[in-house]
């Protein structure tokens, strides 16, 4: 009984202790809350008191010294740097134009653009003296890069201008309207188009004047390309018999053509020969060519007066090691003309309808060989349709890459679209 009373006493004592702790905790909480309220009231009062004092206190007058004004002006007037608009160079504009054109061209049009044909090859007529529906239909199928006119196509000034203007208007892309070397040497053409220079060629000045005279006449009748000048070091040369004389006079003549709006095509690289009916192998060494013909062509190339060069159908076995015509030779085009002489313009074959080609190659073989050798344009093949189909098939099969075709077209477009780049640049 005493043990139970003792337990009961302990429980009551524990209960009183817990109530006492709860009371102390409650009192502590009340104290903290009271302190917080007091601090809050004091803070609000201080805030309002400061605001009241600020409103009642007049602001001090701001006196700007000269130094302060200058410092403020300097800070305010410092312009924000803005990036300058990027200016397009002519190379940028040309690339944009050619990329756009090439991107829209079909493969068929690209391949056709590497061909120079006669109006008869294009239309199938015996002698073309007018551009009509037959020309329009043919050009819609074959977007050729150039059309070469011979003496039989030129009857009068009005006739040839009308023919060339109509032809150009029918083309999908700009076209070279070309006066052939044969037509340029023809007395009837010279007389009809007034292509005789006003004075005899004796030096650079008269050569340049002659180029201007001939170029102005050609341009007037809507030609834009001429297989001129004949860069020949011989007794028959129009520009002299010595390499030093020929290179200066031929280059000056080409510059006159160019300034008149005519693309000058130097002929024939590396040397002229009779290739009309059969093979012509010229037995000269590279050293001989370097001291004569190469010197003359190099001047025209370095001066920029000749944007195109026609390669002969003659062969040079001492240079190439075989009888491959220069127009189909990678050695003569790639290593010599492009490499040794540094020419990056349009390389055109001599007419592939000549006997030096047709006696040994089919039209298909010659066209493919010319492009593989590095030529950009195939001039007057024996059979245009066969040549075109063979080259198209070679690209479609992958034996010639499309990028190789584009490479030549870029060189061609650099001339054809030059005026458009200039117009954009001026604007």
Image (tube, grey):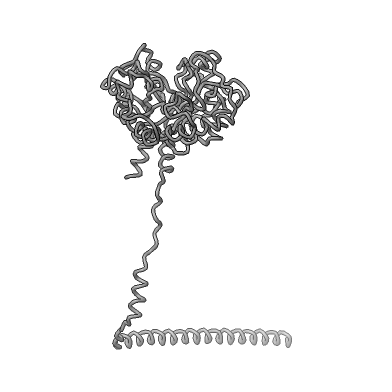
Q: Position of residue 33 (x, y in %)?
A: 48, 84
Residue 41 or 181: which is nearer the viewer?
181
Q: Is residue 348 visible?
A: no
Q: Is residue 375 visible?
A: yes
> Measuring 40% from the left and 86% from the top, which residue is drawn there?
41
Residue 334 or 142: which is nearer the viewer?
334
Relative side of 72 to 297, left or right: left
Q: Position of residue 354 (x, y in %)?
A: 48, 16
Q: Which quarter of the rendered picture does the N terminus lie within?
A: bottom right
Relative side of 318 to 148, left or right: right
Total numbered labels placed on residues in the image: 0
> Measuring 40% from the left and 57% from the top, which residue is drawn there?
83
Q: Quadrant of residue 216?
A: top left
Instruction: Give the farthest residue toward the left.
Output: 158
Q: Which quarter of the rendered picture does the C terminus lie within?
A: top left
Q: Position of residue 155 (x, y in %)?
A: 29, 17
> Measuring 64% from the left and 85% from the top, which residue is drawn there?
14
> Measuring 55% from the left and 32% from the top, which residue is drawn there?
290
Q: Quadrant of residue 213?
A: top left
Residue 380 or 276: which is nearer the viewer?
276
Q: Quadrant of residue 399?
A: top right
Q: Position of residue 20 (x, y in %)?
A: 58, 87
């Amino acid at each position: 009984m005493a043990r139970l009373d003792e337990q009961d006493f302990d429980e009551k004592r524990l209960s009183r202790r817990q109530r006492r702790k709860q009371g102390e905790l409650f009192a502590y909480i009340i104290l903290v809350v009271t302190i917080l309220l007091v601090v809050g009231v004091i803070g609000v009062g201080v805030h309002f008191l400061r605001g009241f004092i600020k409103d009642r206190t007049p602001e001090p007058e701001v006196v700007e010294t000269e130094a302060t004004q200058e410092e403020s002006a300097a800070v305010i007037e410092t312009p924000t740097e803005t990036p300058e608009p990027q200016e397009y160079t002519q190379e940028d504009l040309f690339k944009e134009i050619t990329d756009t054109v090439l991107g829209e061209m079909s493969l068929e049009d690209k391949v056709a653009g590497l061909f120079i044909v006669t109006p008869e090859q294009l239309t199938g007529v015996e002698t073309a003296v007018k551009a009509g529906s037959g020309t329009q239909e043919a050009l819609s199928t074959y977007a050729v890069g150039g059309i070469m006119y011979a003496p039989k196509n030129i009857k009068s000034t009005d006739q040839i201008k009308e023919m060339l203007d109509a032809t150009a208007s029918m083309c999908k892309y700009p076209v070279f309207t070309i006066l052939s070397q044969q037509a340029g040497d023809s007395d009837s053409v010279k007389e009809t188009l007034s292509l005789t220079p006003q004075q005899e060629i004796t030096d650079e000045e008269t050569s340049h004047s002659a180029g201007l005279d001939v170029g102005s006449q050609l341009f007037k009748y809507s030609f834009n390309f001429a297989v001129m000048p004949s860069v020949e070091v011989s007794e028959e040369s129009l520009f002299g018999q010595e390499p030093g004389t020929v290179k200066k006079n031929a280059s000056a003549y080409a510059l006159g053509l160019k300034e008149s709006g005519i693309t000058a095509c130097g002929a024939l690289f590396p040397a002229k020969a009779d290739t009309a009916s059969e093979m012509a192998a010229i037995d000269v060494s590279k050293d001989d060519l370097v001291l004569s013909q190469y010197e003359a062509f190099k001047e025209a190339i370095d001066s920029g007066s000749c944007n195109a060069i026609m390669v002969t159908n003659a062969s040079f076995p001492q240079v190439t090691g075989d009888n491959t015509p220069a127009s189909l030779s990678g050695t003569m085009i790639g290593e010599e003309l492009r490499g040794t002489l540094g020419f990056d313009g349009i390389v055109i074959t001599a007419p592939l309808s000549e006997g030096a080609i047709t006696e040994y190659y089919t039209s298909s073989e010659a066209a493919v060989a010319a492009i593989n050798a590095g030529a950009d344009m195939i001039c007057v093949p024996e059979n245009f349709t066969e040549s075109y189909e063979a080259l198209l098939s070679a690209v479609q099969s992958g034996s010639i890459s499309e990028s190789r075709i584009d490479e030549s077209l870029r060189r061609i477009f650099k001339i054809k679209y030059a005026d458009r780049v200039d117009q954009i640049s001026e604007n």
